[in-house]
Amino acid sequence: MDELGPATEHEMVLAFVQAEVDAPRWRDLYVWALQQIGATRALIDRPDLTSGAENAKRIDILRRVRGYRGNEYLFRGFPLDTTWRRVRLPPLQFDLLRQCTGAPAFIELSRGTRRVVDAAAYLGQFRTPTSQNVRAVVQALKTGKTYPPLIAVDSGEGELLLVEGYTRATAYAALRPPRPVEFFIGTSPNIRRWGFY
């Protein structure tokens, strides 16, 4: 794992919303959240990370859609004292990655192990919407498409638990790209309190 240095919460939040804003499962909720706060897609597509007002709006969007800082949905019990850093993870180290317990379709794809590399290995044996989405991302990666960094937390036990990017992580593990993949990694002494740990 190549350490790239500390990251801000605002950088992580931006990567999170950029990764999900066009996803079919979440798109309508992001449109709704942007309308609720009176913002346009420019807040996500042309961000200014030096703007405190913009950063606060993106946090508000992630709270409305995914429960961030609201102790709801994906972020139920997620520790507010999490610190972030950027890393590059070589595909050979993807065996460190586990799905959180809030990703049942991916846990099924891994045959219950929660290991991303297992989900990738069993990909050809499943014909589900989840496996089809992963295969679509594999094809997109092969054509040169790039994605925002993935987001994970340090489990405190030598593993990385995915918070955002299950489809992309499984696609990267299946493809084994030649270059390392960028991540935001969160660390907290209270991470076991996360509802989906």
Image: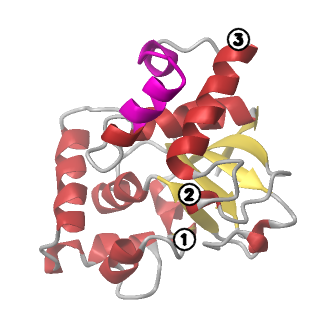
User: Quick one: 11 or 120, which is closer to the camera?
Assistant: 11
Pick whichever of labels 1 and 2 is earlier in the sequence.
1
Name the residue beneath numbered marker 3.
51
Quarter of the figure with residue 105: bottom left
Q: Can residue 148 be seen in this view?
A: no
Quadrant location, the C terminus: bottom right
Image-based side of 135 in relation to 57, left or right: left
- Secondary structure under tag 1 reads loop
Q: Name the residue under label 1.
A: 100
Q: What stretch is highlighted in magenta?
A: 30-45
Can you tell which of label 3 and label 1 is closer to the viewer?
Answer: 3
Dot 3 and dot 1 residues touching (CB under 8 Å): no
Q: Does the segment drawn in magenta span residue 44?
A: yes
Q: Which of 17 and 8 is in front in this view?
A: 17
Residue sitting nearer the eye, 93 or 134: 134
Amino acid of disc 3: Ser
- Asked if residue 1 can be seen in this view, the reply is yes
Q: Mark 1: which amino acid?
A: Cys
Residue drawn at the location 66% of the way across and 72% of the way down = 195
